[in-house]
Image (tube, rainbow, N blue to C red):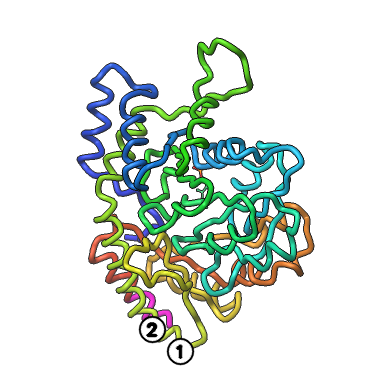
Amino acid sequence: MRISHNRPDVRQADKDAVAAVLASGWIAQGARVAALEAAFVSMNGGGGACAVSSGTAALFLALHGLGIGAGAAVAVPSYSCSALLNAVNMAGARPVPVDVRSDDFTIDPASVESLAPDAAAVVAVHTFGASASVEDLKSSGRTVIEDCCQSLGGPQGLVGDAAVYSFYATKIVTGGQGGLVWDKTQKVAEAARDYREFDCRETYEPRFNFQMTDIQAAMIESQFGRLDEIRARRRTIRARYLEAAEPLMTAGWRLQDGFNEASHLPYRFVLLAPDSNARDAMKSRLECSKVASIVPIERFELLHRYLGVDPGRYPVSEMLADCALSVPLYPGLSDEEVDLVCDALRLAA
Ligand SMILES: *Cc1c(COP(=O)(O)O)cnc(C)c1O
């Protein structure tokens, strides 16, 4: 059997939680959504949380709530996803792609200074679970939104002006779709809540139906309850892969940095090939061993390419698009499957 690159880990407890909502007679936004928000406030030690329909909606609402709109430039890491462009454009602001660092793949503060000197805000993506330098980015006086869509359960999210999360099917915990915005002052969360509650308001202002259902919230909450277990399992699998990838390291390959602290939750295990030919050959060899792997971000997906900006200013993003390969890393992998991936990595070296 082929090992897929991703697979949601849906347990009996998750099904029971969803079944309870279905039986309750209330399936739209309600008590489960409120409970999920309370769980995030508790995880982050206070502040305010507002659950919404997607991570993209959460990012839009964070920008909107922080007053980043028409006329503002927003620095975004080019090595990320088009959702960032969509959210910034939806807020009426102007996305400015900047380059990332080659060691941990996160946004490069020096590139923000050189390519987006006028940016009022920065979206700091904690890429594949590694921590962006939020303190550095904040020290420039800019508004910083922490994109925790790939780092839920890690040490991130507490330093920026707001944090956003996604519960899409391939993320760390999922309800199929979903998102959440959190901030320490509660101001951003309250603004998001006002925007989300579009119905039966006494006065009219532009708002939008960004609501999450209790069906989704119950599933997310159930998975969220075993976050420690998810983190531990992912770290165990990563440790096994590190061993198996050792021979590749002597052959010019390397790995993404940034997972040294026990609190880090590895979202992906990304191998970096010496060049694109070696990467593509590895992908084929893993496929022969029935292990699926993906190019996490293809060259055409780089945000500067979507916006038609000179690729020469983004050497690291271009290199990562050419050389990065992601292998299956999720808690639903059985021990046998982890062994198979390890064997495939050794065989392919
Ligand atoms: C998934 C993701 C998003 C968007 O979240 P959706 O729930 O799919 O809208 C934004 N940023 C990052 C880094 C993501 O991984």
Can you give x and y, in whole percent of width and height, for residue 225 in the image? 25, 45
- Residue 346, magenta (yes or no): yes
For label 2, the residue is 246
Three-letter code, disc 2: Glu
In this rendered view, identify the residue nearer to me: 50 or 228. Answer: 50
Q: Residue 279 sits in which quadrant?
A: bottom right
* Disc 1 and disc 2 in contact, CB within 8 angstroms: yes
Q: Front-most of 349 and 73?
A: 73
Q: In this view, does 347 lie above or below 23?
A: below
Q: Mark 1 points at which residue?
A: 250
At mark 1, the secondary structure is loop
> Could you say which quadrant of the image residue 47 lies in?
top left
Determine the secondary structure under disc 2: helix
Image coordinates for residue 173, horizontal then vertical, percent: 36, 47
Q: Label 2 neighbourhood size at 10 Å, few (<14), some (14-19), many (20+)? A: some
Span highlighted in magenta in the image: 343-349
| Identity of the residue drawn at 54% across and 56% down | 125
Residue under the point 36% across and 33% down: 216
